[in-house]
Amino acid sequence: MKISVIKDLLDAEVVCGEEFLDHEVHSACGSDMMSDVLAYVKDQAVLLTGLVNPQVIRTAEMMDMVCIVFVRSKTPSEEMIRLAKESDMVILCTKKRMYEACGKLYLGGLGVSAVK
Amino acid sequence: MNEAVRFHFVVDGEDFTSAGQASVQVKKNLRRLGIPPEIIRKISIAMYEGEINMVIHANGGEAEVLVYEDRVEMILTDRGPGIANIEDAMKEGYSTAPDNVRSLGFGAGMGLPNMKRYTDGMKIESVVGEGTTITMTVNLT
């Protein structure tokens, strides 16, 4: 699935990384607990979260994720946007809540485990 | 490369938002050295968890990363309160982190278990009231 499709499915706003919207991603995970993301995530390329602090960006960076979706209308700080830009990440913001956002992507064909 | 390539970082304990800076830098440095991405990921996650731990529990510390031909060693040293019961601390879900840390997305009791999970060797030396040194090794071959 292209990141641009994620944006459309979630009626999301692009905060940064517009130039990477054509990138293909194959899996996603949703969590507000970064410890769990670090523990259980394998090759997920997209992180959906309602947590807003710079550690979200760093966690995604450590996991080689390419796109972060902030749910429930959460807005990242300037510092977070700067960090994301440094790492060539896409940040999307959606008004949808976590459950609905994950559901839309899942129904849209974005799986939970990586397709090699 | 007979001698190790060495990186040294001071981890600032005052500012949670800056935690992880050393790990980001290590990741960049290892990429430059041409280490495979999946190995870099293991090293960075372990280092990041260690760094977060030092900020949460020990008011910061120091990190030394040594890159040998066949392995990478990370030595994290702090002068924090020490770990009273290492066996408990290694259990998934066991945490002594304050509640405000959980609201930041950490403190789920996964730090040390994750560090062990992603490395090939981990040694914890800790003295209550003096501090903790954690040595982690990730094999490159």
Image (cartoon, coloured by chain):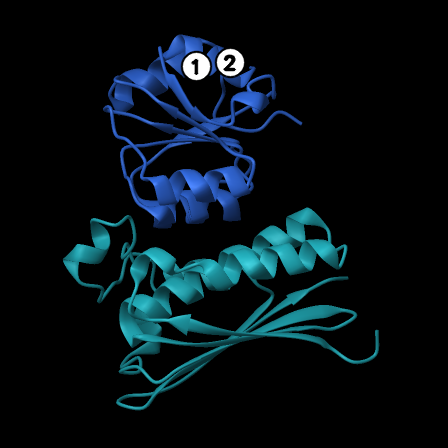
Give the residue drawn at x 50%, y 37%: A85
Q: Quadrant of the N terminus of chain A?
A: top right
- The amino acid pointed to by label 1 is Lys
Q: Nearer the viewer, residue A115 or B59?
A: B59
Measuring from the top left, give residue B137's x and y in whole percent.
61, 70
Measuring from the top left, give residue B96's x and y in whole percent.
22, 67
Measuring from the top left, give residue A44's x and y in whole percent.
51, 33
Give the residue drawn at x 73%, y 62%: B140
Residue B117, can we see it?
A: no
Give the residue drawn at x 31%, y 39%: A77
Can marks 1 and 2 be said to lie on one chain? yes
Residue wearing tag 1: A7
- The amino acid pointed to by label 2 is Ser
Measuring from the top left, give residue B117's x and y in whole percent.
50, 58
**Residue A43 versus residue B31 in the image, above or below:** above
Q: Helix or strand or loop: what does disc 1 sit on?
A: helix
Give the residue drawn at x 30%, y 79%: B83
Marked residue chain, label 2:
A
**Label annotation for residue A4:** 2
Left or right of A24: which side holds B68?
right
* Name of the residue lying farthest toward the left: B99
Left or right of A94: which side holds A109?
right
Q: CA distance from mark 1 to mark 2?
A: 5 Å
Labelled pair 1, 2 in contact (Cβ < 8 Å): yes
Mark 1 burial class by Cα count in 10 Å: few <14, some 14-19, many 20+: some
Mark 2 burial class by Cα count in 10 Å: few <14, some 14-19, many 20+: some
Marked residue chain, label 1:
A
Chain identifier, blue in the render: A
Figure quadrant of residue B108: bottom left
Left or right of B119: which side holds B60?
left
Q: Colour of chain B?
A: cyan
**Residue A68 versus residue A26 in the image, above or below:** below
